[in-house]
Amino acid sequence: MATHWTIGADAADPHRLAAFWAEALGYIAEPGYDDPDGASLIDPDGRGPAISFLRVPEPKTAKNRFHIDIRVAGEPPWNMPEREQLIRAKVEALRAAGATELRDEFYGDDLGHVVMLDPEGNEFCVA
């Protein structure tokens, strides 16, 4: 049996960051979690890990050593033009939610993933 686990994240504004990631992942606020210096999200289907955000005083200073990949295209085999359309649509939605697009990464001639920053500068990829 797998162990239940939570991804923990430092944040300058935990509620703003939690709202962004709830939108990005389709998560919801954890019922009963009420902390002005923290926020917690859960997968409403109970499959993915919880994510908690804790207010910290220091700013982010370096590249993440660990990051989230948002996989919108499902599992292979892929129709690569359809996969790219799914990725581009998610990238646009995340930009509207406050993310910044950094760069496209290609696998040969095909879009592999898009590297982005969340509202506090944490790197993640959309694939």
Image (cartoon, grey):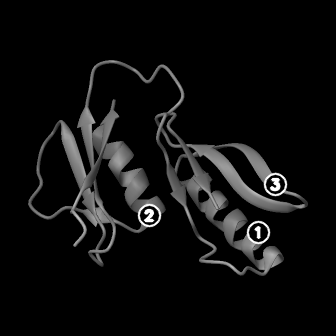
Which residue bears the numbered disc 2?
A: 25
Q: Are marks 2 and 3 in contact (CB under 8 Å)?
A: no
Residue drawn where x is 59% and y is 77% of the image:
74
Q: Is residue 126 left or right of residue 111?
A: left
Location of residue 22 (image quadrant): bottom left
Closer to the camera, 5 or 23? 5
**What label does residue 106 carry, if any?**
3
Q: Label 2 is placed on what type of residue?
A: Leu
Q: Earlier in the sequence, mark 1 or mark 3?
A: 1
Q: Residues within 10 Å of mark 2 (few under 14, many from 20)?
A: some
Q: Label 3 is placed on what type of residue?
A: Phe
Q: Earlier in the sequence, mark 2 or mark 3?
A: 2
Residue drawn where x is 52% and y is 34% of the image:
121
Gap between marks 1 and 2 measured at Cα: 18 Å
Closer to the camera, 52 or 36? 52
- Reply above or below: 7 against 10: below
